Image (cartoon, rainbow, N blue to C red):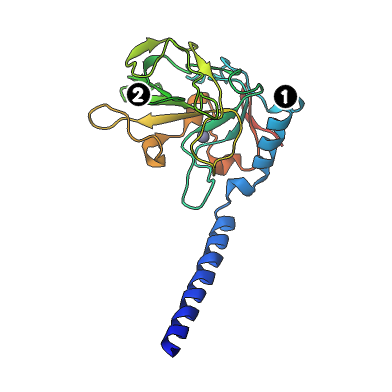
């Protein structure tokens, strides 16, 4: 009986210590969901017209960056942002000013487009020679181009199962949506854009793992890694600037 009671106390103590560590890590890890930048994302999504100064325009280029802006909107989340303990965001989230299915998405750079069977909201474009590391092959991954139920906003020109179709930079690919299987992620119509590395055989690696991706900001002409962006909304005016 006594042993049983001791065991219950031990389990309870374990749970309390676990919770305390979880909360401590949550704040210590600067979880982006608790940050000022997330409040700005929410404000923009409610009334994009009121926050025009946060918006970047599709098909523009910042300075002499190799990539065009693939869509219009506010860069709300960047590479390495953390939405929960142990998680790191693998790309840029660009929140558009229009309703689901309305804000256009274009190819940021020329390459060979593939859309795997079952990819309702995603496509990937192979770039044989990385403009920042010539000779190395990378992939640009575009996702969230479907509505909440998974009805695709990708153009019919790029059906599921298509592979290695050449597209020029600036080619219209589809429209921003809010399709996401992950309820922990912030909702809101956006494009998730990431750069994925190749494996040894030249195929793309699993794009959901941060170590398989590169910081896309350098390809847009500036350094937007989470540590540098902090609470600010990235903006371009000739060179990359952060709003005060
Ligand atoms: Zn994202």
Q: CB of mark 1 within 8 Å of CB of mark 2?
A: no
Position of residue 178 measured from the top left corner of the image (x, y, whole percent): 56, 29
Q: Quadrant where the N terminus lies?
A: bottom left
Q: Residue furthest front?
A: 1
Position of residue 188 measured from the top left corner of the image (x, y, whole percent): 61, 32
Residue nearest the viewer, comparing 179 with 228: 179
Q: Earlier in the sequence, mark 1 or mark 2?
A: 1
User: Measuring 35% from the left and 12% from the top, which residue is drawn there?
Assistant: 165
Query: Mark 1: which secondary structure?
Result: helix
In the image: residue 207, left or right of residue 35 = left
Residue 133 visible in this rendered orientation of the protein: no
| Numbered label attached to residue 116 | 2
Vertical relation: 210 (above or below) 173: below
Query: Mark 2: which secondary structure?
Result: loop
Please give the residue where the numbered disc 1 appears in the rendered image: 52
In the image: residue 211, left or right of residue 79 = left
User: Residue 99's image quarter?
Assistant: top right
Ligand 1 neighbours mark 1 (CB distance < 8 Å): no
Residue 201 visible in this rendered orientation of the protein: yes
In the image: residue 185, left or right of residue 169 = right
């Amino acid at each position: 009986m006594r042993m049983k009671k001791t065991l219950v106390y031990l389990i309870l103590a374990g749970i309390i210590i676990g919770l305390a560590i979880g909360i401590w890590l949550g704040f210590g890890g600067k979880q982006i969901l608790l940050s000022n930048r997330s409040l700005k994302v929410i404000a923009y999504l409610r009334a994009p017209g009121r926050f025009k100064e946060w918006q970047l325009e599709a098909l523009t280029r910042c300075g002499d960056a190799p990539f065009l802006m693939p869509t219009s909107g506010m860069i709300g989340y960047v590479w390495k942002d953390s939405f929960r303990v142990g998680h790191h965001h693998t790309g840029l989230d660009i929140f558009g000013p229009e309703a689901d299915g309305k804000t256009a998405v274009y190819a940021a750079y020329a390459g060979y487009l593939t859309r795997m069977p079952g990819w309702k909201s995603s496509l990937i474009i192979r770039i044989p020679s990385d403009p920042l590391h010539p000779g190395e092959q990378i992939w640009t991954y575009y996702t969230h181009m479907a509505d909440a139920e998974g009805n695709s906003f990708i153009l019919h020109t790029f059906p599921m199962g298509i592979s290695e179709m050449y597209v020029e930079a600036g080619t219209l690919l589809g429209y921003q949506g809010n399709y996401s299987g992950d309820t922990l992620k912030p909702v809101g119509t956006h494009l998730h854009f990431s750069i994925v590395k190749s494996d040894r055989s030249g195929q793309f690696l699993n794009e959901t793992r941060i170590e398989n991706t590169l910081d896309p900001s350098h390809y847009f002409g500036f350094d937007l890694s989470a540590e540098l962006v902090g609470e600010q909304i990235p903006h371009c005016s000739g060179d990359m600037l952060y709003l005060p």
